[in-house]
Each structure stands twice: as C-alpha cells, then as structure tokens.
Image (cartoon, rainbow, N blue to C red):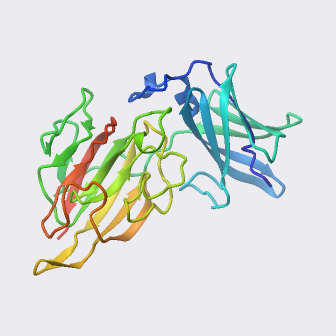
Amino acid sequence: MLIPVLVLALVVPALTADRSSTFTDPSGAGPDFAVQGEYVGQLAGDNGPIDLGVQVIALGDGKFTAVGYFGGLLGAGWDKSEKRRADGKTVDGVTVFEVEDDHDITLTIKDGELTITSEGRDQIAKLKKIERKSPTLGAKPPAGAVVLFDGKTPDKFHGGRMTDDGLLMEGATSKQNFQSFKLHMEFRTPFKPAVRGQGRGNSGFYAHGRYEVQILDSFGLEGRANECGGIYSVGPPKINMCFPPLSWQTYDVDFTAAEYKDGKKVKDARITVSHNGVIIHKDQVVDHATTAAPVAEGPEPGPVFLQNHGNPVRFRNIWVIEKK
C-alpha cells in the first residue's frame, strides 16, 4: 500500500515570513511555523490500522516539504521502509502537495489535525500534531557533577554571553578543561524557514575543542555526517533524531579521551552520543580532530566548546561528570 503523502493540503493564512527572517521565539514565528512539525496517527490498511508519522518542513514563502514514515516517526516506530516525500506551496491560503504516482489522496491540516481523505472524500486517517520531548530534558546534575551552565551566569565560559531570559549563547568555551567525561546539554536551533543547508541553525558541540558533534536544523533531512548529530568527517548519526526548530533538544555524551605514550597517540578517542534519548553513535572511534576544531589533537585535557557559526543557537542545563 502506498503511503498517502501524495496530495497534501495545509490550510494556513496567506501571510508568510520574509526570506531573511530568523525566529528565536515560537510565539512570533509566523503562520508557517504553526503548520510545520510532526503529526502521528493511524492509517487504515488492508490488514488493520498502520501507524503513520509525518514531518512537515517549512521552507519559507509558504512552501513546505512533507515526509511520511510507516510505523511512526523516527525513533518512535518507523519501520525503515521507504520514506515518501512531497513538495508544495500555499495558494489562496491552502498549501497543496502533489506526488506523481497518486493523485487520489488528499491531506489537509487544520487546527493541529492532519486528515487524510481519498478521491471520494472518504476519511482514511486523522493525525494529530505533537511536540515530542526528550526523555532526558531537564535532567538534574548528580552529586559531584561540574555544572557549567544553569541559567544564572555564563561566567564558567570564556566568551560566555547570556540572553535576557537566561539562555547561553553560541560561541562559548568552558574555562575548565576535562579529560574523559560524561556530559548533558540542551540546545535549541532557530526557525529559519527560507535558509538551506549549513546556514540553517548551525553550531556544534566540540569535546576537548577537538571533536565536533554537529548542531543544525536538520529536521526531516537524511541524517548525514554534516547534519545534526553527525560527527564531521567521521560519520553520520545512526538515525536523524532532530526535532523541529525551536524545540528543546538534548545531547547526552560519553566521551573517552585519546591515549598517548611518549608523545605518540596509541589509542583513538571514542564517543557515544544520545540525541533526544536515542543513541545515534555508540562507542564511535574518532581518529582525528574534526573540521574547524579550535584545539589540535594532543594528550592534554580540553574544553567544552560551543561553536559560533553566525546563528542564534541557544543552550541551557549543561553539566559534566569527569570519568576516572
């Protein structure tokens, strides 16, 4: 059975964001932001209901891409079958997506519900918009943890800057250095619907200032090594767990530093990363300092570095447990 992400009609106001707009607050992000996001429900199948997830990506100027997943959303049941995509745009307040291989299915989104109907207007499914939250969101630092940022002061970072509402800004390097460690951090990418690729909410977490786990608005994309959760020039995430822009997301990291003897590296660094509660790298070997690393490889401990790539990425609740 073909997934019915085929003709997608999204009922939205005609007003759309200026192409240069960057939004850091959901309350003022415009009508396209209200449509984009994740929808879940069940599709009527020949052998019973089928779980279905749809990600709707805003592209600016009233344009969207929809991606459909049998079994549920990524990290929440997707059966790894072929994803189905459709592109469309808003015309007279309705955004219509068409796919060449089936023009008999229509999806409409209104008031947070996505309704799928057949050519005869029979309802096939109704999906509700959801806002997923990482199971580690708001995790409390255990006894003995080094709290780098708790919303009170950015003073534990070189270059630390804080917004009026208590969030750490990009472009910060911890004053304290660490060897092997576990880390929890929370981050939020901006909503930049008209921008593509590396300009869309770009930052990065660098362990030791050497090894980058990318931060980017990669919602609905393929999950490559230069996208959110990827380790630059090393490998892509096992699954793209990127939530929609302006959602709070988590990285939980277990980092083991490289080992050196007589000034020569004898064992590469290794890293395990969970993104929004799902493991995306498990004991991954990182055999070189990644792209744009501010610190060269070496035996010395290094800082937690949060890259400034010209995007208003925000951080909170950052703490580290040093490993013995």
The image shows residue 6 at horizontal and vertical percentages of 75, 42
Which picture quadrant has residue 89? top right
Name the quarter where the N terminus is drawn. bottom right
Q: Please tell me which residue is depicted at 55% across the width and 23% down the height of the picture.
A: 31
Q: Please tell me which residue is depicted at 51% across the width and 39% down the height of the picture.
A: 131
The image shows residue 135 at horizontal and vertical percentages of 42, 51
Q: How many circles with numbers are drawn on the protein?
A: 0
Name the quarter where the C terminus is drawn. bottom left
Asked if residue 16 is positioned above or below residue 201 in the image, the reply reads: above
Asked if residue 263 is positioned above or below residue 281 in the image, the reply reads: below
Asked if residue 132 is positioned above or below residue 75 in the image, the reply reads: above
Asked if residue 189 is positioned above or below residue 287 in the image, the reply reads: above
Which picture quadrant has residue 262? bottom left
Q: Tell me if 249 is positioned left or right of 1 in this view.
A: left
Report the front residue among 148 and 119. Answer: 119
Q: Tell me if 197 is positioned left or right of 284 in this view.
A: right
Report the front residue among 3 and 324. Answer: 3
The image shows residue 74 at horizontal and vertical percentages of 56, 54
Report the front residue among 63 and 109. Answer: 63
Q: Tell me if 13 is positioned left or right of 275 in this view.
A: right
The image shows residue 52 at horizontal and vertical percentages of 67, 49
Which picture quadrant has residue 34? top right
On the question of residue 35 being in view, the answer is yes
